[in-house]
Image (spheres, helix red, strand yellow):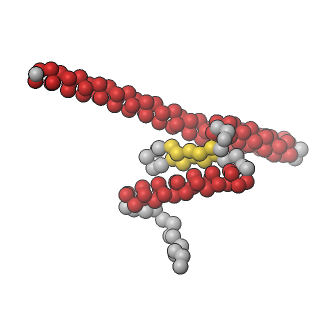
Amino acid sequence: MGRGRVQLKRIENKINRQVTFSKRRSGLLKKAHEISVLCDAQVALMVFSSKGKLFEYATESCMERILERYERYSFTEIQCATDEIQQNGNWTWEHAKLKARMETLQRNLRINLWLNQFLSFRKRTKNCKNRITYLQRRRRRKLMWSRHIGS
């Protein structure tokens, strides 16, 4: 006997929402891996949690190469559409050219925002690690000092 269909709406309970996110995220990453293996496809998957934490999956080639390929493909597609429209007249061509440029800029902006979030996350992680190391050293010194005074 199977489960009923899940109603798609926001989960109000914060803990249940986090558990569901974790389970579904792992399922999504598993599916991405499966399609890459079964179909010999290059897959890039990015998921940001509600707190902004990045989870990513990329096939054997790295994420940056796949994103660059996506950008080149999109640009070529836009160029082909622009070439077609150019034959219809200057105004429509100019409009299409500006629209294609705007779409490219928006796509680049999304990619840059993602990269900035990723780099910011890495920087925050490094800062946290440095802070933990500093606190551990300080704690060891205090313990040694208290043992020295106590003896």
In the picture as drawn, the residue positioned furthest to the right comes out as: 87
Residue 141 in view (yes/no): yes
Q: Image check: 72 left or right of 45?
A: right
Up the image or down, 20 lies above or below 130; here it is below
Query: In front: 27, or 90?
Result: 27
Residue under the point 42% across and 58% down: 19
In the picture as drawn, the residue positioned furthest to the left comes out as: 150
Write down the quadrant of residue 106 in the picture. Answer: top right
Give coordinates of residue 86: x percent, y percent: 85, 42
Residue under the point 32% across and 25% down: 134
Give coordinates of residue 107: x percent, y percent: 65, 41
Give coordinates of residue 148: x percent, y percent: 15, 20
Residue under the point 39% across and 31% down: 129
Picture quarter with the C terminus:
top left
Residue 67 in view (yes/no): no
Q: Image check: 110 left or right of 103?
A: left
Residue under the point 68% across and 50% down: 36
All told, the count of numbered labels is: 0
Query: In front: 88, or 19?
Result: 19
Query: In front: 143, or 96?
Result: 143
Q: Image check: 116 left or right of 134?
A: right
In the picture as drawn, the residue positioned furthest to the front comes out as: 151
Up the image or down, 75 lies above or below 126; here it is below
Give coordinates of residue 73: x percent, y percent: 75, 42
